[in-house]
Each structure stands twice: as C-alpha cells, then as structure tokens.
Amino acid sequence: MLPVLTMFDAGARNVADCVPQIKTQFQIADEEAGELLPSGRVTVLQSRTHWARTYLSKAGLLTSPKRNLHVITDRGRAVLAQNPPKIDNAFLAQFEEFEAWRERATSGPGGTDHGEAAPAGQGAVPRGESAQTPEDAIAAADKVLRAALADELLALLAEVSPQRFERVILDLLAAMGFGRGELSNGHMTKTTGDGGIDGVIHEDALGLDAVYVQAKRYAPDNKISRPDIQRFVGSLTGEGATKGVFVTTSDFSREARDYISRVQHRIVLIDGQRFAHLLIKHGVGVRVRATYTIKTVDEDYFV
C-alpha cells in the first residue's frame, strides 16, 4: 500500500499507471508478473495493486473524482510526511472511515449477510483470520468483495443519466419478480411533470396491481427527509395507489423511516447500500468473473 500511495503522490492517475512501476520497484520478473489469478483474467500483480488502491481509498488517503481517476488527499500526503515504514490494515485502522467500512464489509447493511471480503493474499479486512477454517476465509473474502463492488456500483450510478438511473431500478424490480420478470410490465414516467412518480411496474403479469417508484440520487451525506416521503405519499394518493418503492443512493433520516410506519400506504424504503446489494444479488449491472466450487467426498460412491 505504501508504494502505491507514493506513486499517486508522484502523479499516477490510476492502477494501470502503478503496475509497471510496482513491477520495476520490486524487481518482479516478467514470468512472475504474468501470473494469473485462478479466474485467468487478471494477474496477481494487478489484483494486489487494485486492492491496495481500494483500501487506501476507504481510509481517505485517496479520492476518486471520477471513474478510473484517483487522487491523493491531504490526509494521504500527511501520512507520507510521517515516513511510515509500511502501510497495512493495522495502520489504516486509525482512520474512522476505514474502520466503518470494515464493520460494514463484515456485517453488511442493517446487520444482514450482504457484506464483502478481501481476496486471499491481500490481507483480508475481517479480524481473527488465523482462527478461520478455509470455508470461513472464503465466506469472509466474499463479503469484502461484495462490499467493494457495492461501493463501485454506487459510484457508477452517480454518473449515469437520471433516465438511466430510473431504468436500473425498474430492471431490478423486474429481476426480483415484479411483473413476472417481464420488463414490458414496467415503464418510466415522463421526465417532467411526473407528479413525484418516476416509474411504475405491475406487481403481476395481468397488471391488476401496480407499484409506483420514486428515485433520488443524493450524495451519501444528503439523506432523504420526512418531507420527501410526505410528497411521495401525496403522489401515491393522487394516483389512487397504495404501494410504492422509494429508492435513493444515500440514506433516509430517522424521521423519514418513522413516518413510513404511520401511513396506510405500503411503502418500501431502499437506501444506497441495500440497493447496491440487491443489484448484486439479482445480477443487474454485474456479471460473474470467477466461480469457486467446494467439493466433499461422496460417501455413497464408496459404499
């Protein structure tokens, strides 16, 4: 992590800029540098450099103003000014942002099993790995991978057009089984004058009941407030609707969540982390890069 941070301080713009310098600095032979992960798509060197960049970003030492562009922060420069002998997870634990991400990565949003884990050989985020069984280590690594992927999805969603963002939500609802999974059973409303409704998807294939969708792309620190939810409820009432889904890339205030529990409408609130993990779970906007199969002895075969 220390060499990667130093390279970004020297002007590197992304991981691709760092990999050749890492190879030279550590005198890595061409054959070793070409060693692939089991997936066969990415080299070990590329993967480890990528994860170094990811962990540094989670600690606030790097920032990403746009996709595939990473810039050292004032905190990152302050760390380099300390001349640390190395940077690892123990060093990064001093930063609240890194610890918060580590907790979220191991527990998932709302304490559910949605988190993420780090790849083998990367110094996985979860604690106590020395006592883990191989299966536990794989499960922990899967959590960190999912957490990092969720953050990447949210960053991408911040860059797409409003219409595309609304379409992603409808695609997710279709993938979850609304409208019997048929995309034709959902549609977006007009971009203007939509009365606070961004999309509609039928709950069943016959269109007997509809779910109305509101979508808000907010910065992580800009939570959806109670007035936002009240306006959505008013829009549902105006449509004669009883069911709605409110999706945001940020989060909902406590007042907004409390208000939902007191209205007659059936409204589901989906915050940014839950939205990203639902996309991953239902395969929307993501694809499988590698699959690992755990095999056990077939006792019946030997009987």
Image (spheres, rainbow, N blue to C red):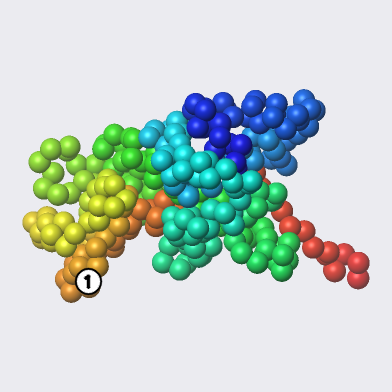
Q: Residue furthest bottom?
A: 262
Q: Position of residue 214 (x, y in %)?
A: 22, 51
Residue 98 vs residue 35: left or right?
left
Q: Position of residue 217 (x, y in %)?
A: 27, 45
Residue at image x 35%, y 53%? 272
Q: Is residue 191 visible?
A: yes
- Pick whichever, 272 or 93, lies toward us: 93
- Pick whichever, 133 or 173, lies toward us: 133
Q: Is residue 281 visible?
A: no
- Pick whichever, 263 or 101, lies toward us: 101
Q: Quadrant of residue 27?
A: top right
Residue located beneath label 1 in the image: 258
Q: Position of residue 59 (x, y in %)?
A: 48, 50
Residue at image x 29%, y 43%? 166
Residue at image x 68%, y 60%? 137
Q: Residue furthest right?
A: 302
The quadrant in which the N terminus is found is top right
Specify the amino acid type for callout 1: Asp
Residue 298 vs residue 96: left or right?
right
Residue at image x 73%, y 35%? 36
The quadrant in which the C terminus is found is bottom right
Residue 49 vs residue 31: left or right?
left
Q: Position of residue 31 (x, y in %)?
A: 80, 28
Q: How many marks?
A: 1
- Pick whichever, 77 or 125, lies toward us: 77
Q: Is residue 62 above or below residue 99?
A: above
Q: Residue furthest front?
A: 82
Q: Quadrant of residue 83?
A: top right
Query: Mark 1: which secondary structure?
Result: helix
Q: Residues within 10 Å of mark 1 (few under 14, many from 20)?
A: few
